[in-house]
Image (spheres, helix red, strand yellow):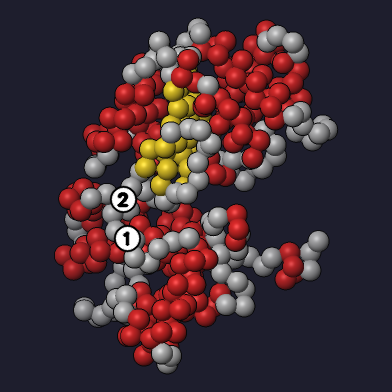
């Protein structure tokens, strides 16, 4: 990712450059925090390119479906694992046991963290090292714990640790860099790159609905197609890329409420949210469509905000809920084990 292509990210790039500038004499760590599609991965790719150009060792991992304990750490440290035997006090054996999936209970996370950090510092003394963990929320829990352990101790070593997390998540004790929506001039420039051939009215509507979200500004133009006569109104279509990024938007919540919307209310609340969006954010107009009192609409909207942790007065929250709603409509959840009788 060429840094010149990252519109509106000058402040974030300067902070990341300052962090990388500590190498090789010292290091540090930072969590890039923001909502889905806001550009955290693009910033990490820019850092990775800079690390390669500088000749530093680059270790990368991206969260995925494998939640086996230490599976993410195994991927991250694989390039240097061949030297684990040089570690003191049997720490190489600790790492081997941690990475041997299915061969027995894994070692204590604290012991694995110390062994992993000692391996990392030994190799970093030979070559400055940059660790990048993208979509960290989807890494297995023990790997996240080890990553936080290493990040908190990186500053005294030629090591930089960067992790991307969705809004509201952190690595304890690690500084946070907020990656927010683009300002309007940057959003317009990005949209112009990807929607120059679209009608002006469509471009303005995409700009308004994307609320500065870079992924939406790129993918909504790609997914757009006429759905009716000129001047007619219909939902902007959501393609597979946006669906993948936002379909979990209604389900990624604080631990106190893992399931965003209760099953017995889900359809009603989603219908209310959709009517509110369709009415331009007017509770009164949505109430007419739903044949309820405006206060009923407001009560349901407050319930959605409380259950999802997204504010309907904040542009970023509105963007995430709007795109999540359409993604969920297009990609319904598979039946749960309870509904299918599986055990």
Q: Position of residue 19 (x, y in %)?
A: 36, 24
Q: Quick check: can you spot residue 53?
A: no
**Residue that badge 1 annotates:** 315
* 16 versus 38 height, above or below: above
Q: Determine whether the residue tagged by mark 2 lies in a helix, strand or loop.
A: loop
> Quick one: which residue is furthest to the right in this view?
104
- In the foreground, 243 or 89: 89
* 320 versus 106 height, above or below: below
Q: Is residue 202 left or right of residue 176?
A: left
Q: Residues within 10 Å of mark 1 (few under 14, many from 20)?
A: some
**Residue that badge 2 annotates:** 181
Q: Position of residue 18 (x, y in %)?
A: 32, 24
Q: Position of residue 304 (x, y in %)?
A: 48, 70
Please tell me in which quadrant of the rendered image residue 340 appears.
Answer: bottom right
Kindly check if marks 1 and 2 are in contact, taking CB atoms under 8 A apart as contact. Answer: yes
* 260 versus 1 height, above or below: below
Please tell me in which quadrant of the rendered image residue 100 appears.
Answer: top right
Q: Quick check: can you spot residue 297?
A: yes
Please tell me in which quadrant of the rendered image residue 283 appears.
Answer: bottom left
Residue found at x 30% / y 64%: 209
Q: Mark 1 to mark 2: distance in Å?
A: 9 Å
Q: Determine whether the residue tagged by mark 1 lies in a helix, strand or loop.
A: helix
Residue found at x 32% / y 53%: 213
Q: Position of residue 112 (x, y in %)?
A: 69, 25
Q: Is residue 42 left or right of residue 110?
A: left
- In the foreground, 86 or 34: 34
Q: Which mark is residue 212?
A: none
């Amino acid at each position: 990712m060429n840094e010149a292509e990252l519109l509106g990210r000058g402040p974030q790039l300067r902070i990341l450059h300052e962090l990388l500038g500590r190498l090789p004499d010292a290091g540090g760590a930072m969590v890039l925090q923001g909502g889905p599609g806001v550009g955290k991965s693009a910033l990490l790719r820019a850092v990775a390119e800079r690390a390669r150009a500088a000749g530093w060792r680059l270790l990368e991992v991206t969260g995925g479906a494998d939640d086996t304990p230490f599976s993410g750490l195994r991927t991250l440290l694989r390039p240097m694992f061949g030297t684990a035997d040089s570690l003191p006090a049997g720490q190489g054996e600790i790492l081997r046991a941690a990475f041997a999936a299915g061969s027995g209970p894994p070692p204590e996370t604290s012991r694995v963290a110390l062994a992993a950090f000692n391996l990392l510092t030994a190799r970093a003394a030979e070559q400055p090292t940059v660790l990048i963990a993208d979509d960290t929320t989807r890494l297995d829990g023990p790997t996240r714990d080890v990553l936080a352990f290493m990040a908190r101790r990186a500053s005294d070593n030629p090591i930089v640790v960067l992790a991307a997390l969705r809004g509201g998540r952190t690595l304890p004790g690690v500084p946070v860099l907020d990656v927010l929506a683009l300002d309007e001039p940057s959003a317009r420039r990005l949209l112009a790159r990807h929607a120059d051939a679209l009608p002006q009215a469509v471009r303005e509507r995409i700009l308004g609905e994307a609320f500065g979200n870079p992924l939406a500004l790129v993918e909504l133009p790609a997914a757009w197609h006429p759905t009716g006569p000129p001047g007619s109104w219909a939902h902007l279509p959501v393609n597979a890329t946006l669906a993948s990024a936002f379909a979990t938007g209604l389900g990624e919540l604080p631990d106190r409420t893992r399931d965003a919307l209760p099953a017995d209310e889900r359809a009603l609340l989603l219908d209310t949210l959709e009517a509110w969006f369709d009415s331009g954010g007017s509770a009164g107009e949505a109430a007419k469509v739903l044949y309820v009192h405006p206060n009923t609409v407001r009560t349901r909207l407050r319930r959605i905000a409380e259950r999802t942790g997204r504010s309907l007065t904040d542009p970023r929250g509105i963007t995430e809920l709007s795109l999540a709603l359409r993604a969920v409509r297009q990609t319904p959840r598979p039946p749960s084990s309870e509904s299918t009788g599986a055990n």
